[in-house]
Image: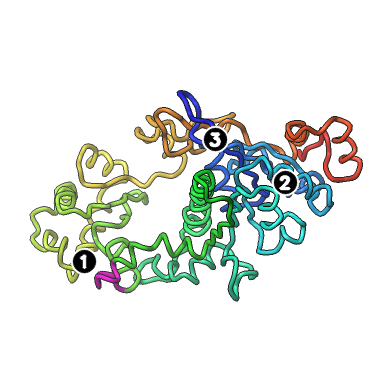
């Protein structure tokens, strides 16, 4: 690995091969690319002929920062090319169900034989082994099976899926990026290569560790009656006079007292007592709801500006770009002409960045193969055999 110096990215010198897919593996690879890894996306050759209707790869922000090569891995020469890339890589990201890449002759066994120091990271839903290993599933299913989905929602309603942010992205994709980093670190420290099983079922359970802590302390009850799930009057969203909403996170006593001062309920002994007394929560929520409905969202934002009450207006994505702290940090500034979240976290000496726009499938095939040492004649021969294409990308 190159030693990062001033102006270089944290993962300079790390190369990752990513089998093209959607969702969690795509997000994990994006994080690695933002941090400076050379991520080569291996797309299907069929993506050149059968692009998805209405899909513009240039606007698929989860693919940013990559180079793309399009190969037919069903062709023996395609699998051979992939293994040649493996030899000069630190990690492979495999998003398919167990067994798919092995049937193509490019599974973990073949890849680790080609590069014994390789980290072979498998992004699975249910895990590599077990009765569900080859079953279909999505984020919502993994959350349901791990017990996490049942935790999310209000007391008077059913479970509410938290988009696909827990299993797919916060759990699966982010843990995938961490696993690649940990695996590369271990390999370069002498442990050698290995297969890493990143299962979204495991990841969703892991993200709910705090709930298991509260359960162990006998501080967690049915859905919607707890500190963090809209049960507490000081941790919820409230509708305002204009149909907007404000978020309230005044958990600590000092913040809660400031909240009550802001809404004019600080002289009510029952409201003060509700901070600790759960039997008063229902009535306290009712009183706060009534108070917040007396003004508009922006009027409440002005009222709580500068107060340490942990009250913020609920902004939509367009409004969020104008939030003063969001604007100060440049979180949604356009990159390559498209507004998108900035890379995170932020490094002082080795900053991350969006170095490339999302590629077209196969856009860098010629460049990548030339980097492998294939001559123009060899590349043309492979193109003639249907393994790849030269100068042709999906548009």
Q: Residue at x 40, y 65 (%)?
A: 152
Question: Is 49 positioned to the left or the right of 152 in the image?
Answer: right
Q: CA distance from mark 3 to mark 1?
A: 55 Å
Q: Residue at x 46, y 39 (%)?
A: 318
Q: Residue furthest front?
A: 190
**Overall secondary structure of the magenta stretch?**
loop
Secondary structure of the residue carrying numbered label 3? loop
Find disc 1 in the rendering and name its residue: 281
In percent of width and height, residue 47 lies at 76, 47
Cβ atoms under marks 3 and 1 closer than 8 Å: no
Residue 204 image position (x, y, % from top left): 46, 62
Mark positioned earlier in the residue sequence (2 or 3)? 3
Residue 205 belongs to magenta span: no
Looking at the image, which is closer to me, 289 or 73?
Answer: 73
> In the image, 303: left or right of 22?
left
Residue 327 lies, with reference to residue 297, above or below; the image says above
Q: Which residue is mark 2?
A: 43
Q: Is residue 313 above or below residue 207?
A: above
Does the segment drawn in magenta span residue 220?
yes
Q: Nearer the viewer, residue 169 or 302?
A: 169
**Magenta extent:** 214-221
Quadrant holding the C terminus = top right
Q: Residue at x 71, y 38 (%)?
A: 360
Residue that mark 3 sits on: 1
SS under mark 2:
strand
On the rendered structure, is 50 left or right of 347? right
Q: Nearer the viewer, mark 2 or mark 3?
A: 3
Q: Looking at the picture, how far across and down is residue 294, in whole percent?
A: 25, 51
């Amino acid at each position: 690995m190159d030693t990062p110096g001033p102006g270089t990215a944290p993962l300079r010198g790390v190369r990752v091969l990513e089998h093209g897919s959607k969702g969690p593996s795509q997000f994990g690879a994006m994080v690695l690319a933002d941090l400076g890894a050379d991520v080569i996306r291996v797309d299907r050759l069929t993506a050149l002929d059968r692009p998805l209707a209405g899909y513009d790869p240039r606007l698929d922000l989860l693919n940013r920062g990559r180079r793309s090569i399009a190969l037919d891995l069903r062709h023996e020469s395609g699998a051979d090319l992939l293994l040649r890339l493996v030899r000069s890589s630190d990690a492979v990201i495999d998003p398919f169900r167990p067994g798919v890449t092995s049937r193509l002759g490019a599974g973990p066994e073949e890849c680790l034989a080609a590069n014994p120091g390789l980290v072979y990271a498998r992004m699975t839903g249910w895990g590599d082994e077990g009765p569900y290993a080859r079953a279909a599933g999505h984020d919502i299913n993994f959350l349901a099976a791990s017990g996490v989905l049942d935790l999310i929602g209000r007391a008077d309603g059913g479970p509410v899926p938290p988009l696909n942010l827990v299993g797919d992205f916060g759990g699966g994709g982010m843990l995938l990026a961490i696993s690649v980093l940990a695996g590369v670190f271990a390999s370069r420290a002498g442990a050698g290569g290995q297969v890493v099983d990143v299962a979204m079922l495991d990841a969703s359970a892991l993200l709910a560790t705090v709930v298991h802590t509260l359960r162990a302390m006998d501080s967690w009850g049915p859905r919607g009656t707890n500190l963090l799930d809209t049960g507490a009057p000081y941790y919820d969203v409230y509708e305002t006079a204009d149909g907007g909403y404000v978020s309230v996170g005044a958990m600590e006593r000092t913040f809660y007292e400031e909240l009550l001062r802001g809404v004019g309920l600080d002289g009510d002994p029952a409201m003060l007592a509700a901070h600790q007394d759960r039997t008063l929560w229902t009535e306290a929520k009712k009183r706060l709801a009534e108070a917040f409905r007396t003004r508009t969202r922006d009027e409440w934002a002005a009222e709580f500006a500068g107060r340490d009450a942990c009250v913020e207006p609920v902004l939509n994505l367009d409004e969020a770009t104008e939030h003063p702290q969001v604007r100060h940090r440049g979180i949604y500034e356009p990159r390559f002409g498209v507004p998108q979240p900035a890379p995170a976290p932020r490094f002082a000496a080795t900053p991350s960045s969006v170095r490339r726009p999302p590629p077209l499938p196969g856009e860098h095939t010629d460049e990548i193969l030339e980097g492998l040492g294939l001559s123009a004649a060899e590349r043309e021969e492979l193109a003639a055999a249907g393994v790849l294409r030269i100068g042709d990308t999906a548009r």
